[in-house]
Image (cartoon, rainbow, N blue to C red):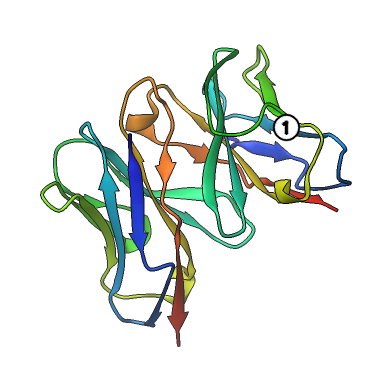
């Protein structure tokens, strides 16, 4: 079975500071990993995904994530936070073909301080 | 290209009533997924439909049911509503293997049970 743990339900950073949102996964098969962002009163938008190949994945809005198999991690980073980055972020894992469902973490709410 | 559309945006029902939520996937997407996002509980997988068939089901009671129509749109029905059913219900669609493409989410239906 697959599972996702997001460390920190709430992260607060200053505008211009590094953003680091942590995600650890558990999967019995090679994982496919995703980060989604949810703005208030909206659905989820795909930020980036890792399937196979290069372990450093670049996404939209300047975000990137690195798949580290040895650490079972897929942390999301952005070098310089912007006020518009304030949102909730979800990490998700998909494993078995045929199971066809993403398993989401509990989410991390990112607050940007001016 | 139109995204995933959900209706209604908001729905208020009384305990014991039935609620019907609707979802239209992106054109060409044959898989539809339903998730419940209740306060403090993250995203919980409800149902997966593909080619008109229910393919997988999350850990929810039978009063949560649905169907997928020949045009791939989907309906989620919740019978005998309980207060704890109050949540944002998100629909997503996928083109083929969700591990490769991820999901595209709609903006959700906020169900309030009073």
Q: Which residue is drawn at 89% across and 46% down?
A: B14
x, y percent for residue B8: 78, 42
Front residue (pair A49, A109): A109
Front residue (pair B41, B66): B41
Front residue (pair B20, B63): B63
Q: Is A111 situated left or right of B100 in this image?
A: right
| Farthest residue, direction bottom | A114
Q: In this view, does B72 lie above or below B44?
A: above
Q: In this view, does B45 lie above or below A91?
A: above
Q: Is A18 situated left or right of A102 in this image?
A: left
Q: Is residue B21 above or below residue A35?
A: above
Determine which quarter of the picture holds residue B6. Answer: top right
For disc 1, the neighbor class at 10 Å (few under 14, some 14 to 19, many from 20) is: many
Q: Residue at x 61, y 34 (%)?
A: B60
Q: Which residue is drawn at 34% across and 31% down?
A: B99
Q: Determine whether the residue tagged by mark 1 lies in a helix, strand or loop.
A: strand
x, y percent for residue B104: 50, 38
Q: Residue at x 38, y 20 (%)?
A: A98
Question: Which quarter of the figure is the N terminus of chain B placed in?
Answer: top right
Determine which quarter of the picture holds residue B51. Answer: top right
* Residue B75 seen in the current view: no
Q: Name the residue under label 1.
A: B22
| Number of dots carrying numbers | 1
Q: Is A5 situated left or right of B28 in this image?
A: left
Front residue (pair B107, A33): A33
Q: Is B77 situated left or right of B70 in this image?
A: right
x, y percent for residue A59: 31, 52
x, y percent for residue A54: 14, 43
Q: Which chain carries label 1?
A: B
Q: In this view, does B81 lie above or below A56?
A: above
* Residue A58 seen in the current view: yes
């Amino acid at each position: 079975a697959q599972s996702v743990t997001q460390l920190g339900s709430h992260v607060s950073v200053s505008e211009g500071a590094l953003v680091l949102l942590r995600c650890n996964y558990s999967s019995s098969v090679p994982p496919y990993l995703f980060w989604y962002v949810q703005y208030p009163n909206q659905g989820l938008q795909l930020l980036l995904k890792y399937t196979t190949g290069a372990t450093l994945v670049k996404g939209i809005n300047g975000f990137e994530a690195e798949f580290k198999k040895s650490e079972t991690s897929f942390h999301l980073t952005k070098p310089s936070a912007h006020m518009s980055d304030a949102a909730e972020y979800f990490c998700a894992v998909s494993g078995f073909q045929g199971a066809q469902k993403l398993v989401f973490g509990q989410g991390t709410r990112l607050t940007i301080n001016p | 290209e139109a995204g995933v559309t959900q209706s209604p945006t908001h729905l208020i029902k009384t305990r014991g009533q039935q609620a019907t939520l609707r979802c239209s996937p992106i054109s060409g997407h044959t898989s539809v997924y339903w998730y419940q996002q209740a306060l403090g509980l993250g995203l919980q997988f409800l149902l997966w439909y593909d080619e008109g068939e229910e393919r997988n089901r999350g850990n929810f009671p039978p009063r949560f049911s649905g169907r997928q129509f020949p045009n791939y749109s989907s309906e989620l029905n919740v019978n005998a509503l309980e207060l704890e059913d109050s949540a944002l219900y998100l629909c997503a669609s996928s083109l083929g293997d969700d591990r490769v493409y991820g999901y595209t989410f709609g903006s959700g239906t906020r169900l309030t049970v009073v």
